[in-house]
Image (spheres, rainbow, N blue to C red):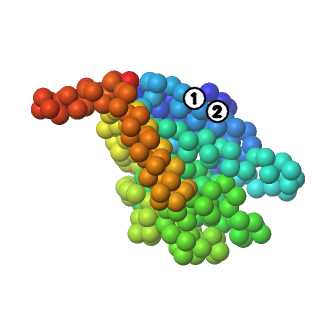
Amino acid sequence: MGEFVRLETNDGIGTIRLDRPPMNPLNMQVQEELREAAHAAAADPAIRAVVVYGGEKVFAAGADITEFTTTTYQQMSVRAGALFDAIAKIEKPVVAAITGYALGGGCELALACDWRVVAEDAKLGQPEIKLGLIPGAGGTQRLARLIGPAKAKDLVFSGRMVDAEEALRIGLADRVVPAADVYSAAVELVRPYTNGPALALRAAKLAIDGGLGTDLASGLAWESMLFAGLFATDDRVEGTTAFVQKRKPKFTGA
């Protein structure tokens, strides 16, 4: 798809593959190519789940800091967060397959996914404070919602890296596996959803993510609306009929 990012599809799973050696720094070009790949994966009905992968050696070591020396306030105010929102808004199950390092923008990219499969020797963190900055593309907001404000403040204030064991313990990682197995483990995590009810999965993701940004009453109303909307789908008919007939449903995503 792009010079440094490509979208590959296999058996209903789309892999957004970063390939800018040696550390996959997220410069402006890579961010734009990632954003385009996210939109393409979201729009392709043949893709039912997504893996974001940086390769066998490193996920993404962060932003290209050389660009920060000349980036203006006006440029950054428009740019910050656009890529990560595109990943987060893919209305399908999305997993980050993390090897090596996921730091700064790389960690924020992982946070925009639904799950994180992490290599045993990987390191994650938000080191922006050491540059006189803060995370600016979800690192303060998504991280705090994922692991809680106290733990998020520890990582953001200190800028320290955490290993895979600590990441799993605090909820930043969902699975920890040997480095050689990261991609295959990520694929296996989302494979069950490729034959699932796509519209119900979409509604479930929208309900959970949308509800996190509002109060309980509004979240419940949002959930109720999405729930009712599924009664207009063929998959609801198939799922409920299959249950009554005591057979396995065959969902079509309609």
Helix, strand or loop for disc 2: helix
Q: Position of residue 16 (x, y in %)?
A: 54, 37
Checking the image for residue 234, the label placed there is none
Above or below — where is 26 with respect to 102?
above
Q: Amino acid at mark 1?
A: Ala
Q: Position of residue 216 (x, y in %)?
A: 47, 59
Which residue is located at x 70 percent, y 38 percent?
Answer: 32
Which residue is located at x 63 percent, y 75 percent?
Answer: 158
Which residue is located at x 50 percent, y 54 percent?
Answer: 218
Above or below — where is 120 with respect to 166?
above
Q: Which residue is tagged 1? A: 40
Screen quadrant of the N terminus: top right
Q: Residues within 10 Å of mark 2 (few under 14, many from 20)?
A: many
Q: Residues within 10 Å of mark 1 (few under 14, many from 20)?
A: some
Frontmost residue, 199 versus 165: 199
**Quadrant of res 196:** top left
Instruction: Report if the CB atoms under discs 2 and 1 are less than 8 Å apart.
Output: yes
Helix, strand or loop for disc 1: helix
Which residue is located at x 55 percent, y 56 percent?
Answer: 213
Q: How many marks?
A: 2
The answer to whether residue 119 of the structure is visible from this angle is no
Q: Which residue is tagged 2? A: 36
Screen quadrant of the C terminus: top left
Q: Position of residue 53 (x, y in %)?
A: 51, 43
Query: In this rendering, would 186 be left or right of 133?
Result: left
Q: How far apart in space, not on screen, are marks 2 and 1 (Cα)? A: 6 Å
Q: Amino acid at mark 2?
A: Glu
